[in-house]
Image (tube, helix red, strand yellow):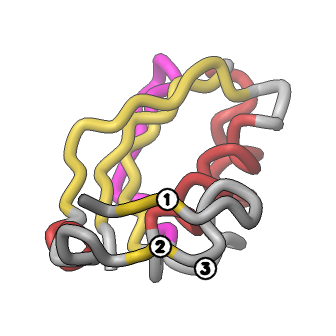
Amino acid sequence: MPIGGIIISVRPEKTEEILFVLVQFPGVEVHGHDEQGNVVAVIDAPSTWVMEKIVKKINVFEAVLSIGFTYLNMEDEVDGPAPGERIPGLFHGVELDAG
């Protein structure tokens, strides 16, 4: 399960609105924010694919100016396919060789 620490820059006047939205996402924990609109959060997702979907959904909101990762741990996914192992379903059905 990847875990990522992120800073979300939002329009300061919309911070409270975005804080409410963020806690609706499963696996997202808000750890703090400041008056300039910087929100510190952690995403704990079952896969990097799910994490990417969450980040894209957060980034859709007009009040969100940017999202930056400050930390990313995905070592359990790095242990993935062995050299030469086929990766089914990657890239919309195209199988690539992992080696």
Main secondary structure along the magenta-highlighted residues? strand
**Horizontal and vertical percent for residue 92?**
75, 59
Q: CA distance from mark 1 to mark 3?
A: 31 Å
Report the residue marked by disc 1: 96
Upstream in the sequence, badge 1 or badge 3? 3
**Horizontal and vertical percent for residue 20?**
71, 59
The span picked out in magenta is 28-38
Q: Report crowding for label 2: few under 14, some 14 to 19, many 20 or more residues within 10 A (C-alpha).
A: some
Above or below: residue 94 compared with residue 81: above
Q: Which residue is more in the foreground, 82 or 55?
A: 82
The circle drawn on residue 87 is 2
Upstream in the sequence, badge 1 or badge 2? 2
The residue drawn where x is 29% and y is 51% is 5
The residue drawn where x is 57% and y is 53% is 52
Question: Is the residue under label 2 in contact with that under label 1 (CB below 8 Å)?
Answer: yes
**Horizontal and vertical percent for residue 71?**
20, 46
Where on the picture, by quarter, is residue 64?
Answer: top right
The amino acid type, in three-letter code, at marker 3 is Pro
Q: CA distance from mark 3 to mark 2?
A: 27 Å
**Is residue 25 found left or right of 30 in the rendered image?**
right
Q: Which residue is more in the foreground, 30 or 73?
A: 73
